[in-house]
Amino acid sequence: MRLRGLRLGAGLLAAVALGPAACTTTHPEPAGPQATASPTPPRQFKAGAAGAGDAYFPRYGNGGYDVTRYTVKVRYDPAKDHLSGTTTVQATATAHLASFNLDLAGLTVRAVTVDDAPARHAHADGELVVTPANGLTSGNGFTAEIRYDGSPTPLHNNTLGEGGFRHTSDGAVAVGQPESASTWFPVNDHPSDKALYDFEITVPQGLTAVANGVPVRNTTRAGWTTWRWAERSPMASYLSTVAIGEFRVTRGEHKGRPVFSAVTTKLPKGAADASIARTVEVADHLEGVFGPYPFAAYGGVVVSEPGIGYALETQSRPVYSANFFQQGENTEVVAHELAHQWFGNSVALTKWQDIWLNEGLATYAEWLWAEHRDGRSAQQAFDAEYTGASAQLWRVPPGKPGAANLFGQSVYQRGAMTVHALRTTIGDQAFFELLRTWVADKRDGNATTADFVALAEQVSGRQLDPLFDAWLYGTERPARPAPR
């Protein structure tokens, strides 16, 4: 994510655990004279955790299962600000579950089934607790279908701002970090549980509905159009998006992949269109640095809405605030959000504390793009930031910023300086080998700072704890790195 002026992110809701008491089911061994072995202990079916265990956001996500695919089918009527939907969740139990939780904020649940059988459910404070007719055995797959409706509202947090589904003058848009998805479909809302997605979004005929991934096909019937999208690479839930409204749509193809971009008609044609049109040019340059582009589609969406003053790296199709293009063409923000397709999307966070891996590397990609575009070197960018940084920036360690500083300047600028300090210390050959190896080895997965440090030491053949301790975790300005 790239912020403009004001720190904005998604809202935080502390969910309340509503899971039922654990239950136990006994499966006795067959009796008989030859039965001499010790009896198999009974399976203990328990409620799944109402959180993924993230230290910064303990109630985000849920435990006890791993999602494989979401199929999200929604119908939205902007005139009534009403959404109705059916979401199918395909998952595998990772524990013996008597019940499990999904995150769903503000909407009304009408019915739930698990493996086609009706399931009991309770829904309050953003937590949907589902109790199947029978316990779910660890290692087995299951399918839950949830039918729901209502008027979606964004999530709000006094520190990080709003995120999620919001009604607009011509439709709606759902975007935000670190929470967003749960405002329009039930989800395991933490980046550690990536999944595949299918979207079917039905809106009044004449409106566009843009989501992630490859456009599949549109169908129109009785004044409503259904837009279908397929994201076939694993995606963290906060990277899902939908934008509904009146857009100037551009379609194309690049390297055998579809290009689909949309700019709100609230803006006159100009800088925003020109900037988004350079998406594949920027992506090709970054591909030359980081390795193959990791997804099956390209594009971007430009919106002009109060409260959205940032850009977000929504997978395969970033969303940009119109504010970024007020002063003319802006490819720096395009470079930042496209770099996230490698750093943050394909290689996703395991825990929110490590967000510098996303933002520091994406900010550094801006420096590399500026070097390519107009010759201002990454070293010059580093020197300017190092010299001009405020005392507050050095007091906040980017490797452990705290939830309140998740989108603070230390994460972005000091994060990028950490990347350059590493480059200076290990040399260009090892540095660029590290980046390409990182995105290749961790593609479609999750990773941590410890993983990155270990790979940096492996590739460079150097012990790097002092460098990372100073730049990521120290609370004073580190010395300038000595070139290799």
Image: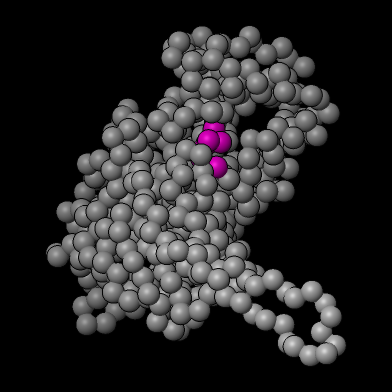
Magenta span has 340?
A: no
Image point 29% across, 79% down: which residue?
Answer: 220
Q: Is residue 381 visible?
A: yes
Whether residue 130 is situated above or below residue 156 in the rendered picture: below
- Residue sticking out furthest to the front: 33
Horizontal side of 467 relative to 114 (left or right) equals right
Quadrant occupied by the N terminus: top left
Image point 37% across, 75% down: which residue?
Answer: 120
Please state the horizontal and vertical placement of residue 319, each as a whole percent of the image: 38, 48
Q: Is residue 335 visible?
A: no
Residue in front for this viewpoint, 61 or 341: 61
Please state the horizontal and vertical placement of residue 48, each as a whole percent of the image: 50, 61
Whether residue 209 is situated above or below residue 137 in the rendered picture: above
Query: In this picture, which residue range is highlighted in magenta?
Result: 351-356
Determine the image quadrant of residue 306: top left
Please state the horizontal and vertical placement of residue 346, each as a whole percent of the image: 59, 50
Residue in front for this viewpoint, 378 or 61: 61
What's the image's color scheme? one colour
Horizontal side of 483 relative to 312 (left or right) equals right
Please state the horizontal and vertical placement of residue 105, each as a whole percent of the image: 31, 56
Whether residue 127 is situated above or below residue 290 in the rendered picture: below
Image point 32% across, 51% down: which residue?
Answer: 164
